[in-house]
C-alpha cells in the first residue's frame, strides 16, 4: 500500500453576498402578503423571521450566492439563472473547474497528470452525463470521472474513496471537486431553512507519496473513515419521479420537495453522533483529541460545532482550534469543511495533525486525519 497526501486545494467563492437583514426583509414582505391571503381563507398564519433568530439558530450573518437576482424579489424568492444549451459548459461544471484549477496549480502539477475526477456534492445539476465527466473534458484530465453524493458529507466521502484508490495503486492523482449551488435548491419561503445555505466550490488533489518522500507543505493522509445511518430529519425529495406523482404532467410542484429539516432533532442527534465518531476515530489512530492541533468541521451551525468540540475536547475550542467560515459564507454543504481547510491550514507547522470532518443528511459523517509535511 502506498501513502497519499492532499497536495493542493482551491476554492471559488461567489462575489454576491446577501445579509440577514436583506433576507429577512424579503421573507417578511412575502409573509405579510401570504398571511393576508391565509386570513381570508381561514388558514393558519405564518410567523415572520428576524435577524436575532437567524444568528442564534445558525451563526450565519451573510451568505454568498451564484446569482442574487430573484432571491430578493418577494414575488419570486429563488435565483434567476438562465438555462444553457447542451453545447455550453454547465454552470455547475464551470463552478467546479474554477476551484479545481486552483487546486491543481497549488499542487504544482498540470491537468494531464490527473487520472480521475470525482465530482462529489450534495446537489447536482443533472443526473447525466456526469458533471465530473464535463469537468474532466474542460480541464483536459485523463482517465475517467464520476459523480457521487452523500449530502454535506460528500467531499469527505469522496476523499475517503480517493485516498483508497491512490493508496491501493488503482489511481495516481485524483481530483475531488465539490461545487455547491444550493441556492437553486433552497426554499426561501421556509422559515426554518431559508437563511442557512450559501454557494461555494472547493477542490482537492490527492496524490501518492513515494517511499520515504516528504512533500513540503502537503498534508499526508493518515486515515479516512465514513459512517451512515438512515434518517429523514434532513431530506430533499426533488427528483425525476416528482413528475410522475403530479396530476398534471406539464407542472411539477416543487413546494415540499425542496430541502427540509427537523432542526432540533438534527442538532441533538448529529452533535452526539459526530462527537462519538471523532473520539473513536482518533482513538483508533492512537491519538487523543488534544493531539490534534486543528479541526476543520462542516460549516453547518455555529452552536452545533461548538457543542461537538466541547464534547470532544472536554472544554470549549478556540477559534484557532476550530476555525469558522460559516458566519460570512453560510452553510456551503460539502464545500464548507474544505473551504475552512483551505483558508486555515497554511500557518500550521510540519508534524502537526488536523482533522477534516463533515456531517449531514443520511445521517452521514466523513473524516480525514491529516499531518502537515
Image: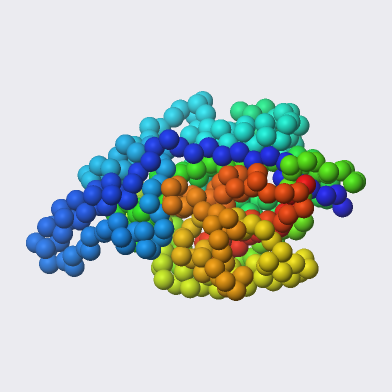
Identified at 32% across, 50% down, the residue is 20
Pick out the residue farthest to the right: 211
Identified at 51% across, 53% down, the residue is 324
Q: In terms of depth relative to the viewer, which is nearer, 248 or 230?
A: 230
Is residue 146 shown to the viewer in this render?
no
Q: Is residue 35 left or right of residue 108?
A: left
- Residue 252, position as x, y percentages in the image: 34, 49
Colour scheme shown = rainbow
> For residue 262, which quarter of the picture?
bottom left
Q: Is residue 10 left or right of residue 245?
A: right
Q: Is residue 252 left or right of residue 165?
A: left
Q: Is residue 43 left or right of residue 239?
A: left
Q: In terms of depth relative to the viewer, which is nearer, 241 or 138?
A: 138
Residue 92 lies, with reference to residue 293, above or below; the image says above
Q: In terms of depth relative to the viewer, which is nearer, 15 or 228?
A: 15
Is residue 359 shown to the viewer in this render?
yes
Identified at 66% across, 62% down, the residue is 226
- Residue 146, position as x, y percentages in the image: 64, 43
- Residue 179, position as x, y percentages in the image: 53, 42
Identified at 74% across, 31% down, the residue is 109
Q: How many marks?
A: 0
- Residue 318, position as x, y percentages in the image: 55, 61
> For residue 59, which quarter of the picture?
bottom left
Pick out the residue farthest to the top: 87
Amino acid at each position: 500500500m502506498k501513502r497519499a497526501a492532499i497536495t493542493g486545494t482551491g476554492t471559488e467563492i461567489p462575489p454576491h453576498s446577501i445579509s440577514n437583514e436583506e433576507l429577512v426583509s424579503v421573507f417578511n414582505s412575502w409573509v405579510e402578503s401570504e398571511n393576508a391571503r391565509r386570513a381570508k381563507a381561514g388558514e393558519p398564519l405564518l410567523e415572520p423571521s428576524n435577524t436575532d433568530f437567524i444568528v442564534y439558530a445558525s451563526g450565519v450573518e451573510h451568505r454568498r450566492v451564484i446569482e442574487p437576482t430573484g432571491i430578493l424579489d418577494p414575488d419570486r424568492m429563488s435565483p434567476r439563472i438562465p438555462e444553457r444549451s447542451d453545447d455550453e459548459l454547465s454552470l455547475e461544471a464551470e463552478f467546479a473547474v474554477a476551484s479545481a484549477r486552483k487546486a491543481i496549480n497549488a499542487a504544482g502539477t498540470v491537468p494531464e497528470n490527473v487520472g480521475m475526477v470525482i465530482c462529489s456534492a450534495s446537489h447536482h445539476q443533472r443526473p447525466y452525463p456526469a458533471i465530473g465527466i464535463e469537468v474532466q473534458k474542460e480541464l483536459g484530465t485523463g482517465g475517467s470521472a464520476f459523480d457521487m453524493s452523500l449530502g454535506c458529507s460528500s467531499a469527505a466521502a469522496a476523499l475517503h474513496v480517493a485516498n483508497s484508490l491512490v493508496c491501493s495503486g488503482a489511481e495516481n492523482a485524483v481530483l475531488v471537486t465539490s461545487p455547491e449551488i444550493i441556492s437553486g435548491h433552497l426554499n426561501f419561503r421556509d422559515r426554518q431553512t431559508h437563511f442557512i445555505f450559501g454557494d461555494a466550490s472547493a477542490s482537492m488533489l490527492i496524490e501518492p507519496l513515494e517511499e520515504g518522500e516528504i512533500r513540503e507543505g502537503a498534508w499526508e493522509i493518515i486515515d479516512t473513515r465514513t459512517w451512515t445511518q438512515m434518517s429523514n430529519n434532513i431530506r430533499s425529495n426533488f427528483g425525476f419521479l416528482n413528475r410522475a406523482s403530479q396530476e398534471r404532467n406539464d407542472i411539477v410542484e416543487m413546494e415540499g420537495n425542496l430541502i427540509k429539516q427537523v432542526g432540533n432533532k438534527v442538532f441533538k442527534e448529529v452533535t452526539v453522533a459526530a462527537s462519538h465518531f471523532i473520539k473513536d476515530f482518533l482513538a483508533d489512530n492512537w491519538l487523543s483529541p488534544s493531539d490534534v492541533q486543528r479541526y476543520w468541521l462542516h460549516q453547518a451551525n455555529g452552536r452545533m460545532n461548538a457543542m461537538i468540540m466541547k464534547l470532544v475536547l472536554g472544554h470549549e475550542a478556540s477559534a484557532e482550534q476550530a476555525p469558522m467560515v460559516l458566519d460570512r459564507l453560510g452553510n456551503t454543504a460539502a464545500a464548507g469543511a474544505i473551504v475552512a481547510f483551505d483558508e486555515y491550514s497554511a500557518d500550521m507547522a510540519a508534524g502537526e495533525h488536523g482533522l477534516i470532518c463533515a456531517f449531514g443528511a443520511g445521517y452521514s459523517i466523513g473524516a480525514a486525519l491529516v499531518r502537515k509535511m
